[in-house]
Image (cartoon, helix red, strand yellow):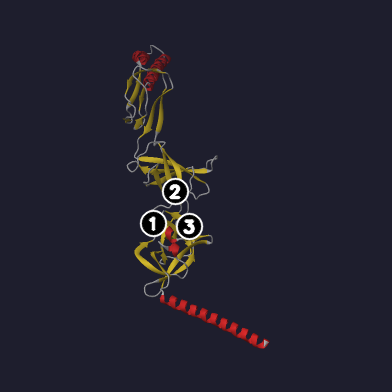
Amino acid sequence: MNITKWLLVIIILAATIFGLHSYKSSLQESAKAQAASMPEPAATVTSVKVKNISYQKHMQVSGEVQAFKFLMLNNELAGEIIRLNAASGSVVNKGQVLLELDHRDEDARLMAAKATLMLENQTLARNIELHKNRTISEEQVDQARAAVQIAQADISVIKTAIDKKILTAPFTAKVGIHTLEIGQYLDKNSQVLELVGVNDFTWVDFNLPQLYQELALGSTIKISPMNQTAEYEAKIIAIDPQLSRISRHLKYRAQIPSATLALKPNTLISVIVPISKQKTLASVPDLAIKRDALGSYVFILEASDKGSYRAKQVPVELGERQGEQVMILSGVAAGQLIANKGAFKLYPGMKVYLASEIVTASSDVAAKTPVADVSAK
């Protein structure tokens, strides 16, 4: 009786297990059939071909425009202004009279000195005739000749004093703003006029830290006025022979034609200079790069069947960023097709279709100047 009950229980359990197994198998077959009837997951992205560009790391520093010539004109002698020919901000030519002080006293002394010279010349002439007749000694002739030379020296001293009261422009320049007026009295050694030379070139001085490579004389840099995006090329014309003892910076002077860029002295501008040798690097759009905790990647698109591609995840080492482009130090090579817009939704091995938009990487990068995000004074 007990054996019959146990056999019945075993038969019921076996039937239950067989039923469950059959049901699970039917579900799996149904799932496989359903999966076979559905298309493979795929994504549509834009593509870009990796291209190499010439790249040189630059840095931006502050520069200062220097005057071609600068002079603070002082008067050596005191006097009253009787002539003023230098309006504030005007351009004066070399040799032009700028300011004249009252020199009537010197004029009177000059007339007296000329009269004395004439008298001494007459005395010398008489003494020479008398000496020919042996009437006077040779010593008297020498004294008369010395008197003539002394009179000539007195005239030279007076003329020099007059010249010192007439100030002329030593070079073509612009006159600084001043408050001088005719009739104004100037004490000796007063600062009279400020002259800023006019030239066909603009000079820009800037400094670079000693840890960067020294620029060569004649090399090209770029300058950009503050609050402007335009860049202008300038050439280095001078290098300081020694580093600054305080900052350990090396000073350079660059030159740019005034017709290209005319700036006032002491203007602050941005100077963009190369700090490394030029090299060739691959460049891809920033949208093509996928970043996570393990690093940075791009998806190389490998051709598959029927116009589709397979996504292959490749780790890359990133370099400098230039606008929307990123330099790639390693991981990809020129000519490889990679996913661009939409790359974030890809995973390794995923089926990919290309959108109609095709973008060429770094098409404009070579024309731009890569600038490192550093600065120096």
Q: Residue 366 carries which label?
A: 1
Q: Residue 273 carries which label?
A: 2
- Where is residue 326, by image quadrant? bottom left
Q: Residue 319 carries which label?
A: 3
Q: Which amino acid does label 3 sit on?
A: Gly
Q: Residue 33 carries which label?
A: none
- Where is residue 289, by image quadrant? bottom left
Task: Of the two numbered discs 3 and 1 on the same chain, state the one appearing first in sequence.
Answer: 3
- Local crowd size for mark 3, using a 10 Å CA cut-off: few (<14), some (14–19), many (≥20): some
Identify which residue is drawn at 54% across, 62% down. Answer: 294
Q: Which of 74 and 88 is in front in this view?
A: 88
Give the percent coordinates (x, y) of residue 57. Answer: 46, 53
Task: Of the two numbered discs 1 and 2 on the same chain, state the one appearing first in sequence.
Answer: 2
- Where 159 falls versus 243 (above or below)? above
The image quadrant where one finds the N terminus is: bottom right
Tell me how far mark 3 sits from mark 1, CA to CA.
16 Å
Give the structural element (helix, strand or loop) at label 3: strand
Label 3 with label 1: CB-CB less than 8 Å: no
Q: Which amino acid does label 2 sit on?
A: Val
Q: Which of marks 1 and 2 is in front?
A: 1
- Where is residue 47, by image quadrant? bottom left
Tell me how far mark 1 sits from mark 2, CA to CA.
16 Å
- Where 18 falls versus 200 (above or below)? below
Q: Nearer the viewer, mark 2 or mark 3?
A: 3
Task: Of the two numbered discs 2 and 3 on the same chain, state the one appearing first in sequence.
Answer: 2
Give the percent coordinates (x, y) of residue 290. Answer: 47, 61
Considering every residue shown, the one lying at the far front of the view is: 1
